[in-house]
Amino acid sequence: MNRKGIFSALLAIAAVALVAAAIIVSTTSTANVSSADFSKQVLELKSEWNNARYLLDKTTSRALAGSVDAGCNFTLSASAINNSFLITKNSSFGDNCTYTSPTASGTTDITVSTKLKCTKSLSGFSASFEKDVTFKKRVDASSASGSCKITITDLQSGVIEIPQNP
């Protein structure tokens, strides 16, 4: 083989190696972008789920306060809580998140449970986050000097969420 043939062969091998390297770098960059997009999507999804959970927590407190009648009597109603959840879902967190019908139990220390699921789609893949959530509240309704005082305390944090005099 002459020197021109060896030089041409080496040049061809170098060109093939250069093209292969460019393909590998391009594929790796695409994979990294997809991985970065997926990571961002998962973080946004978790943030949406946390926001929806917070809204349902506050909705639970408002629904419990609304379950005290004019005579200052508290009546636990899972359907009233569910109706409040539905209003919050439709007005605040839309179609990405859903919940199961809540269950409620207790007399003054109330436990409300549901399963909250959020799903997000982006560029051909989707992610979802689903978890059981429980809200524990204390309802105090007392009548003093002709007015009803309603206090809702979050038993998980100890925070008084609703001091209210209707």
Image: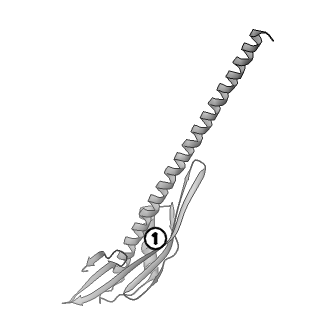
Q: In which quarter of the image is the N terminus?
A: top right
Amino acid type at image mark 1: Leu
Q: Quadrant of the C terminus?
A: bottom left
Of the pair 25 and 86, the residue shown nearer to us: 25
Up the image or down, 83 lies above or below 42; here it is below
Which residue is drawn at the image coordinates 51% and 60% (left, top)? 96
In the displayed structure, does residue 1 sit left or right of residue 137? right
Up the image or down, 98 lies above or below 108; here it is above
Which residue is drawn at the image coordinates 47% and 59% (left, top)? 46
Looking at the picture, how far across and down is residue 68, in whole percent? 33, 84
Can you see residue 138? Answer: yes
Of the pair 135 and 75, the residue shown nearer to us: 135
Up the image or down, 117 lies above or below 19; here it is below
Can you see residue 66? Answer: no
Which residue is drawn at the image coordinates 29% and 81% (left, top)? 151
Pointer 1 local density, CA inside 10 Å: few below 14, some 14–19, many at least 20: some
Looking at the picture, how far across and down is residue 22, in whole percent? 62, 29
* The residue positioned farthest toward the right in the image shown: 1
Residue placed under numbered mark 1 in the picture: 86
Q: In which quarter of the image is residue 24?
A: top right
Of the pair 14 and 137, the residue shown nearer to us: 14
Q: Quadrant of residue 61?
A: bottom left
